[in-house]
Image (cartoon, rainbow, N blue to C red):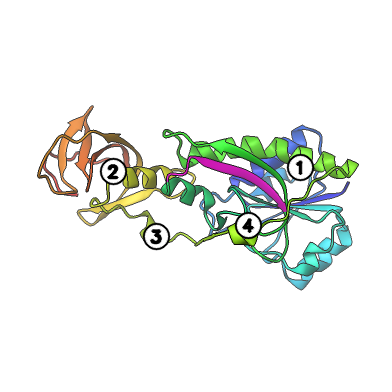
Amino acid sequence: MKILALGSIIFSKEVFNYLLKKNTKIDYILGKKESKFNSDFFDTVKYFSKKSHCKYIKNINSKSSYIWIKKRNPDLIICLGWSSLINKKILNIPKHGVIGYHPADLPANRGRHPIIWSLVLGLKKISSTFFLMNEKADAGDIISKKNLNVRDFDRSGTVYKKLARLAGPQLLQIINNLKTKKITKIKQKNSKSNFWRKRNELDGKIDWRMNSDIIFNLVRALDKPYPGATFEFNKRKIIVWSAKKIENLAKNIEPGKIIGFKKRKPIVKCGKGALVLEKIEPKINFKLHTYL
């Protein structure tokens, strides 16, 4: 089976690596030189250039891309971490179709930034889902789904790694099933779907009037490889990489005030509850009763 893979993020690299280590040949890998969209961008072309035929590509839907792919005539295209839809002409090239991936419980939670929004909303389960791509976002027939329980201590970084470890074996099994024609397709019910929007910079700003649960979820949702939750202090942007919820015994204290310290880490009063700021960037020596 001749395989062409699209991918330009850390997740793509991890899953492609898994396939290659399991002796599944990837004949062609297409990637990007840079990305203004993906904070988890990874140069797959440079990384895999000695293992597969690799090529940088700007627009997957361009005429030149179509001609290039058509000439290679892949049996299967795998698309992981590509921030644009693929047009029908490309989708129709491989006889086994184009396999897409979405870390959510499809048909629910289609759209942008599924790991981030799942943690922001405090979901207890995320799904690792492969589907056959069509011209609509995340709407094709599901061919594999595995659930991942999300713990309170999980952050985007840990969820990201766990999903990559799930996705590699899933994809290998799909490829093996395609070879033996033992693949099950489940049509998505659009009536059960919703669509998450693209996150913007304002979504990552902390408002201390929020309760501590909401801020805690925001911080862990924007953990690396994402850009971090932020607040402004003395006209400087401060990134909160790690925080911990703590019981707040202080009464009649307004949100955003430092009410104490735990192991030299500031405790900040929230709209409800309080948070210990365990890791911030840049480091600042805050004083008691400072307002953030």
- Residue 58 shown in magenta: no
To which residue does mark 1 refer? 50
Q: How many circles with numbers are drawn on the protein?
A: 4
Q: Amino acid at mark 3?
A: Glu
To which residue does mark 4 refer? 33
Q: Secondary structure at mark 1?
A: loop
- Cα–Cα gap, marks 2 and 4: 40 Å
- Cα–Cα gap, marks 2 and 3: 20 Å
Where 15 sits versus 110, above or below?
A: above
Quarter location, residue 183 = top right
Dot label at residue 201: 3
119 vs 262, left or right, is right
- Cα–Cα gap, marks 4 and 1: 17 Å
Mark 2: few/some/many CA within 10 Å (<14, 14-19, 20+): many
| Disc nearest the viewer among 1 and 2 | 2
Magenta stretch bounds: 122-131
To which residue does mark 2 refer? 212
Q: Decide if residue 222 is in sight here.
A: no
Residue most extreme to the top? 263
Q: Secondary structure at mark 4?
A: loop
Where 191 sits versus 80, above or below?
A: below
- Cα–Cα gap, marks 1 and 3: 38 Å
Q: Amino acid at mark 1?
A: Lys
Which residue is at 80% across, 45% downward? 26
What x and y, as percent, mark residue 201?
A: 39, 60
